[in-house]
């Protein structure tokens, strides 16, 4: 207990016009938070002010981050402002770190009013990198648009913030800290908690840990290689996979969290997790996995670096869902994928007669379905997979799901996926990212493209490349009507759907000072030619996508920045 009550101050401030949270919260360069006066304070106050005073008075709030640069100073400010704004208890991960899935778990476990997650996901860290703030609500999931819009509106007119500048939290010591504040009847409590334990307990109730331990350390064990990419998940991997399930210590690499993630983006794809991919090629490891900075995304590899697309990953888990004990008990209420994700999951849903939901990109749409009891398993092409145990995508959960399938079927990753293709056919899928495109050029291209595909004459048009002919069956700008609350979400991506089920999708990604990101997704279904090279199979559709959009001519870009 601190000596004497701590003073609560109201500090004048001025609004900033650029604090609109996106799907993943507010993300900016670190220097924006460091150099703009009260930039962090304004946004945190806007979050607190978006919660009605009676609801936040004495409430519990969870705080955690991925360990990136500026994480700890930001938590210090959040604690000071939480106390001044009537929050009764903060639960903070040890050293200020807690994975995004674990934050969701802890919110739900302690019935918190919500959580503040400090992460920019798979974006680069360090002093010259990115920093982000995301608010999750009492469900454990990302705030809905109604909430983020309210936060943004408050940020545009904010005139003051409340803070308790004398409050200093010790993030290094696990346990309870209490602080007396002036004019407060009850002390403000901060609990520094083991960030792994609650989450690990949840996983123990989902998976058969005895079976997984036999798979990973028994007489006929498999060998795995897991890359935490110097993100927050390192301690989770060490504790759960190595200490509890018996994997050798050298199975886990890059498990020490670093503020700059070792100098590269913690992005689990073949470009940035190249060390993992290289280590898989000689065949000594049966399964490889990588995670992003905050631990919600994952990449799965088989022996010799066999790559599992995120679209295929969720489809395989769906087809083998009862290999996971949790679903044997709960049953399966529905499947879902984001619109750009390949339609591989749709085929499993149709065969199993389980309802399939197609949503916009953004996990909050899945969360709404889960809260209504309509969804059990979902995934996105951007390396996100998860179940209804929490309200976030969950990288380690996805790896344990794959290990459960392997333990049950006693087959390799490659054999499991190839059998899946033989059973359902194969969706060849790729995404081309054109980053840092001139914003005006990108917007003009998308506007003209929408006009083109919206014309009635566009439907039934044929496009031929070599011996392949594709006929347009449908073209639109995707909109989603939420079956739970009837909310309509428009302008979620331009879709061209062909008569054979192939799709071309165009989306404009986040814009920044460096420009916009134009994404082209190509999804082609094949029933016969299922063991071919992805880029070869998709080359005709890629040619058509560029021809229709005139992307190279309109943006001056000759090729994508990233192919996934």
Image: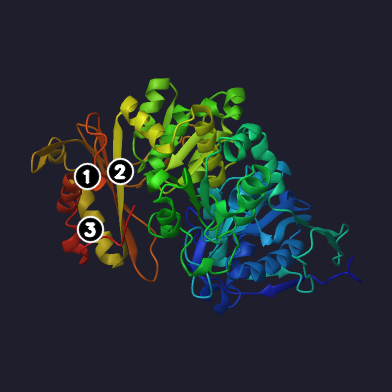
Distance from label 1 to label 3 (Cα)? 23 Å
State which quadrant residue 230 falls in.
bottom right
Nearer the observer: mark 3 or 2; the answer is: 2
Within 10 angstroms of label 3, few (less than 14), some, or many (20 or more) residues?
Answer: some
Q: Say which of 28 and 248 sits in front.
A: 248
Q: Secondary structure under badge 3?
A: helix
The dot on residue 429 is: 2
Residue designated by label 1: 538
Labels 1 and 3 touching (C-beta < 8 A): no
Please name the residue shown 72% across and 61% down the image. 82
Total numbered circles: 3
**Coloration of the structure image:** rainbow
Residue 176: percent from the left, percent from the top?
A: 83, 58
Q: Is residue 204 above or below residue 307?
A: above
Q: Tell me the residue that label 3 is attached to.
A: 445
What residue is drawn where x is 20% and y is 49%? 542
Measured in 3D between alpha carbons, the distance from the residue under mark 3 to the one under mark 2, in whole angstroms, is 23 Å
Residue 348, image x, y percentages: 39, 27
> Which of the 4 quarters of the picture holds residue 330?
top right
Q: Are marks 1 and 2 in contact (CB under 8 Å)?
A: yes
Chain-order first, disc 3 or disc 2: 2
Q: Which mark is residue 164?
A: none
Q: Left or right of 94: which side holds 231?
A: left
Does the image show residue 205? yes
Q: Is residue 32 left or right of residue 73?
A: left
In three-dimensional space, the C-alpha distance between marks 1 and 2, rounded to whole angstroms, equals: 8 Å
Q: Position of residue 409 (x, y in %)?
A: 49, 27
């Amino acid at each position: 207990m601190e000596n004497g009550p701590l003073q609560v101050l109201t500090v004048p401030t001025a609004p900033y016009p650029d604090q609109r949270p996106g799907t993943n919260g507010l993300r900016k360069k670190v220097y924006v938070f460091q150099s703009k006066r009260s930039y962090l304070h304004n946004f945190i106050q806007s979050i607190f002010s978006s919660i009605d005073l009676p609801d936040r008075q004495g409430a519990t709030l969870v705080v955690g981050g991925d360990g990136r640069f500026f994480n700890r100073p930001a938590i210090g400010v959040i604690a000071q402002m939480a106390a001044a704004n009537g929050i009764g208890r903060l639960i903070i991960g040890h050293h200020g770190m807690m994975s995004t899935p674990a934050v969701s778990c802890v919110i739900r476990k302690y019935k918190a009013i919500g959580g503040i997650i400090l992460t920019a996901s798979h974006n680069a860290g360090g002093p010259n990198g990115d920093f982000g703030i995301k608010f999750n609500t009492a469900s454990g999931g990302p705030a809905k648009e109604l909430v983020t819009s309210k936060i943004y509106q408050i940020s545009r007119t904010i005139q003051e913030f409340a803070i308790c500048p004398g409050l200093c939290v010790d993030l290094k010591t696990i346990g309870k800290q209490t602080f007396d504040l002036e004019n407060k009847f009850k002390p403000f409590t901060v609990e520094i908690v083991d960030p792994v334990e609650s989450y690990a307990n949840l996983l123990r109730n989902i998976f058969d840990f005895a079976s997984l331990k036999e798979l990973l350390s028994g007489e006929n064990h498999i060998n795995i290689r897991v890359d935490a990419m110097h993100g927050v998940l390192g301690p989770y991997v060490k504790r759960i996979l190595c200490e509890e399930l018996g994997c050798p210590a050298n199975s886990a690499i890059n498990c020490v969290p670093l503020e700059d993630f070792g100098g590269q983006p913690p992005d689990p794809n073949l470009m940035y997790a190249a060390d993992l991919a290289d280590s898989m090629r000689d065949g000594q490891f049966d399964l490889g996995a990588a995670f992003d900075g905050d631990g919600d995304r994952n990449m799965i590899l088989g022996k010799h670096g066999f790559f599992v697309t995120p679209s295929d990953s969720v489809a395989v888990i769906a087809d083998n869902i009862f290999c996971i004990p949790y679903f044997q008990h709960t049953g399966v209420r529905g499947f879902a994928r984001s619109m750009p994700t390949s339609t591989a999951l749709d085929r499993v849903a149709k065969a199993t007669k389980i309802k399939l939901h197609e949503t916009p990109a953004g996990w909050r749409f899945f969360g709404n379905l889960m809260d209504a009891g309509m969804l059990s398993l979902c995934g996105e092409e951007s390396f996100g997979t998860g179940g209804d145990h929490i309200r976030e995508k969950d990288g380690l959960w996805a790896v344990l799901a794959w290990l459960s399938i392997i333990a049950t079927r006693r087959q390799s990753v490659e054999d499991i996926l190839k059998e899946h293709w033989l059973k359902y056919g194969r969706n060849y899928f790729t995404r081309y990212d054109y980053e840092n495109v001139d914003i005006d050029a990108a917007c003009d291209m998308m506007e003209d493209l929408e006009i083109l595909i919206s014309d009635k004459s566009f439907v039934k048009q044929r496009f031929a490349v070599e011996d392949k002919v594709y006929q347009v069956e449908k073209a639109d700008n995707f909109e989603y009507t939420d079956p739970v609350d009837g909310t309509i979400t428009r302008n979620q991506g331009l879709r061209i759907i062909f008569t054979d089920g192939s799709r071309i999708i165009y989306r404009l990604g986040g814009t920044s000072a460096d420009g916009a990101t134009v994404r082209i997704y190509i999804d082609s279904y094949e029933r016969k030619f299922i063991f071919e090279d992805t880029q070869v199979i998709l080359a005709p559709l890629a040619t058509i996508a560029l021809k229709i959009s005139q992307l190279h001519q309109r943006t001056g870009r000759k090729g994508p920045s990233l192919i996934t």
